[in-house]
Amino acid sequence: MRVSRWYSLVLLLACEGTISSPEWTPPEDIEFTEAEVDFECGDSFVPVDPPLRRLSRSQLLNTIEDTLRRLLGDPGPVMAELDTRLGGLPNDLRTTDENQQEGQLAFFRADQSIGNSAVEAHYRLAEEMGNALATPERLSAMGFDCLSVGATDGGCIDDFIRTLGALTHRRPVADDEFAFYRDEVYQAGDTVSVEDLRDVIAVLFAQPRFLFHVEGTGELDAYEAANRLSYHLWDSMPDEELFAAAESGAILTAEGWDAQVARVVADPRTRRSVRALLTEWFRFDQINTASSGTGADFEAIAGHLDLDEAFDLAAENELIDIFLHVLRTGGTFEDFFLTEITTTTHPVLASIYGIEPATEGETVAVPSERRGILTRVGTLLARAEVALPDINSITHPILRGVFVRRQITCDNLPPAPGGAMDNLPAVDRTMVGSREATETLTSDIGCSQCHGNINPTGYALEAFDAIGQLRSDEPLFDSEGTETARLPIDDETTIFESNDPVRGGEELGQVLFDSEKVGACFARHYVRFTTGRTERLVEDGCLLRTIDEGIDEGRPLTEVLTAVVLEPSFRVRGEN
Amino acid sequence: MTVRKFGRRWMLLGGGASLLIPALPSLIRGNRTQAQGPAIPKRMVMFMTEHGGVWQQDMYPDESAASTSFSHPLHTCHRGPLTPRMEDGDRLVSEALRAPAGVLTESIASKMNLFRGLDVPFYYGHARHLLGNYGDMSNNHDEFPPDQETADQVMAHSTAVYATPPRRRLIHFGNQALSVELVDRSRGPAGGVQPTEEVSAATVFDSVYVPTPDEGMPMREPPINAIYESYARLQSGAFGAGARLGSEDRRRLTQYMDRLSDIRAALITPPIASCDDVDPIDDLPGRWDRYGSDNYQLYNDVIMAGFMCDSSRVAVIRVNDPFTEEVRAYPGGYHEVAHQAPTREDAALAERLRGMLLRSSQAFFRGAFLDLVGKLDAVLEGEGTMLDNSLVWWSPEAGCVTHNGDSIPVVAAGSAGGAITTGNYLDLRNRENNPADDGRRAEVLAHVGRRPGVCYFQWTTTYLDAFGIPRSEWQVPGRSAFSGMGPNHSWMMMQYDQAAMDASCADPLPIMT
């Protein structure tokens, strides 16, 4: 007999308790509440900005790469040379703050911690950057042949500092700053000194304007605005055209700003930001990847597929590329959420959908049961905040439900109270299917308040197995991987206190979208992404409403996203 | 300081893994003698392994090994000499604390301590509580705000440990944060706390190892001062645009500058001891690669380099390797093995998983803990060895029932310069209080010997006292113990006198100092 215990972990992520334990009573402060779907835009709106944000890890890596590209053309060799140091940059963590709903995880980019390790990693990286760039070959590649060792060329040194400084400051170096680099950091006068060049390079890559988003309070100046725009939509530094618009001041005019917004959002570099946004929204980092599947039962359902890391990446990329496709083709948020196409070129992923892979840049229609992003592998794979058992043949209705209720509808799902790990009723998974097992394990009265809202959304996805293959029945296995039973799938359920039946992922997606919760929830995610902090319903009410209304009114996704940067508040920084 | 019997002996001390890999490199050269410094520093290393699960009957000797009773405010406790036995060429303190006799030597065994019955009396999910901060518990315990730094950080910033700023206050390894630091030290807890990020072994080594400069080659000043100055000028408004920054912006710059100061101190502070016995690293990535998967032996060597150069004196390592292939290969890895081990429905599975947990702990004990302890004991220092002047200790994240906090094992070696007595087995449980007598849930009681113990943070007080850290450096208003103990969760099946536990929580462990 195979007795399931992994559900105990699953319960940790949701409403949990010592089921059937006579001692356990649900804590009074554990309460599931529906998310807001209407936002108010009142006079009380004031921009609230976190103090001196540092670049996120992805922003820093992108910025280093783009800086090197601008200097050298091909950033690859230096990036490879610095691989150890780049890898040593601390990861951003999902953090919480006082404005956050319980159970909601903040975005990575809200992590503003500055620890010794980060500062040390910055310093070591900058030092090695100095070593890597202050070589005759690289100086020549940067157009500074004049800096050959031993030469005397004060003008060349000046030009080098101004050129590199403009990139690492992401604005022209001010006179007082230039004097500091030229006279105090570079101490060899007009004589070219490799050691001093290394120091100048190291300082330029470690000074605050490189590592932080240095903005004054009040109206942003032209360069600050250009930087905000590029980091928001490219997750990296401005390009030459944005710098030029800042230098001319055009970016501060309404026409100039609109033109740059349109250009930037249409640029392929937007993919970086879309990846960053969707990684946070869909919690790609917490996916139990298909390639990690193990066990005889997993072999039984997926052994015929080549599930490697490329497949894992393709599952994520599908969602990113559909989002970008909708963005580029004038589609709406609904077109994305209830999409009827795929962009995947991955043959295994396409075969799971029962279609031929798309050719690069093209789309392919998917079968009707795959309508909507909730039916795609990248969303069906289970996510968890803590380490999960490696993926096996078991679907995770609770985890799928938690994902939908937290990330897609933004409902308030508090963290689980202690106790679920012990005394769970035994469930014989050689004979009991996923849905019945979930019901049994969460049937205690103390759990229903949360699980009554969580489980049904997971049940509606039961026609998709653990890796997202469509199935009409559920195979059960013993510990040797031998099939012990095959049960019919029941994916009919009810949600949102309605008695109308919902069946399958396609209908679930439609019902969720029609509830207006999905659009409102996306608005929250996008505000978090934009501001780098938890949304505040009052202060951010106007921003939230702008996005939400754009979705509800079916405006093109491009308009929805750019509405944020077109808001005057985007170019104002709050006092602190 | 004298390094004794390196080379082959060192290799043999490296645990089971290194016995199989005779070419395992070490950063430390052998057979060299270093000058004896004027004062012998104390050092601490803490290992925290995955979230518990080793059954009590495997982790601890029988009750008969601790037969001498002594009184504790909570209940009568017991002690006995830590007496290892021999079996098939191995020396055993318990089944989990077992290694070949050449690795767990008689000398090392005599310098160890084993504590049973140190409790955190509630269910906490995952947490960094072992170093004294509940902020990262995956369960919602609002009663424990993450309001303090962890004990290792207290030590790393105490003048009792470092009379002058060291090159590196703290060595922190492991990709899951274990150490919690103050965001703004000048504001204390009011400035907030944050987990310490992981640092690569290469970065740590760069900071603790100082090669002897070539004669006649002047050392060039690193650019750290200029970097610091660039922050200072923006912060002060000397760089024009700085004038538009807000006060909180400036505070953030100050926080960054504080950390730059630490790095600057590290870069300009020469090591107190000579680094001559530590191999220089010319080809760092290549050299790192030669350790293969023996990350923890690499970490240990880097820690040794820090200690031998006296560049650092405090290290913490979050271990998340199960150390055995059978656990790695099990679906879900250590996590699932630990969770499924107490299953009551399938006795054969439970026994199999119990064995896997045991072997995993044995492998960690040999391959990481004893590897470091052996290296420390191989360095002559003062009247004894570097181990005698150090404290190395290990706790899993939880007790024998994973996520539960009763009888979280503490395995220690070294006396911290004679401040802690060694060779003890302390059984701090209340042997008279057997939860099984109440007919409690069977699966929780699957592990023989579960009994309520004493406050875990008595151990924290013990080692902080041993290092001479004044209480004023870590006690917070309204709380004498290092960390709060909170309400006992009845379902843990333990019966505590909460008031007595709270009252004794700040005391050092009896007889230890």
Image: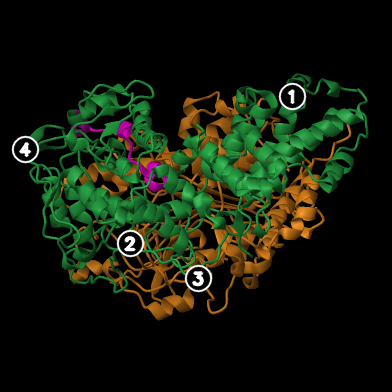
Chain colours: A green, B orange
* Chief SS of the magenta region: helix
Residue at 79%, 41% in the rendered image: B223
Q: Are marks 1 and 2 in contact (CB under 8 Å)?
A: no
Place of residue A321 in the rendered image (x, y in percent of width and height, measured from the top left): 38, 33
Gap between marks 1 and 4 measured at Cα: 68 Å
**Quadrant of the image for the C terminus of chain B?**
bottom right
- Do tags 1 and 2 sit on the same chain? yes
Gap between marks 2 and 3 measured at Cα: 20 Å
Q: Which residue is mark 4?
A: A485
Mark 4 vs 3, N-terminal side:
3
Place of residue B158 in the rendered image (x, y in percent of width and height, measured from the top left): 68, 62
Q: Which residue is mark 2?
A: A37
Q: Which residue is mark 3?
A: A43
**What residue range appears in magenta?**
A278-299
- Do tags 1 and 3 sit on the same chain? yes
Asked whether residue B385 appears in the rendered view, the answer is: no
Circle 1 or circle 4, nearest the eye: 1
Gap between marks 4 and 3 measured at Cα: 62 Å
Gap between marks 1 and 3 measured at Cα: 51 Å
Place of residue B83 in the rendered image (x, y in percent of width and height, measured from the top left): 44, 52
Q: Chain of mark 1?
A: A
Q: Quick one: label 3, few (<14), some, or many (20+) residues within 10 Å?
A: few
Mark 2 vs 3, N-terminal side:
2
Horizontally, residue A315 falls left or right of residue A459, namely right
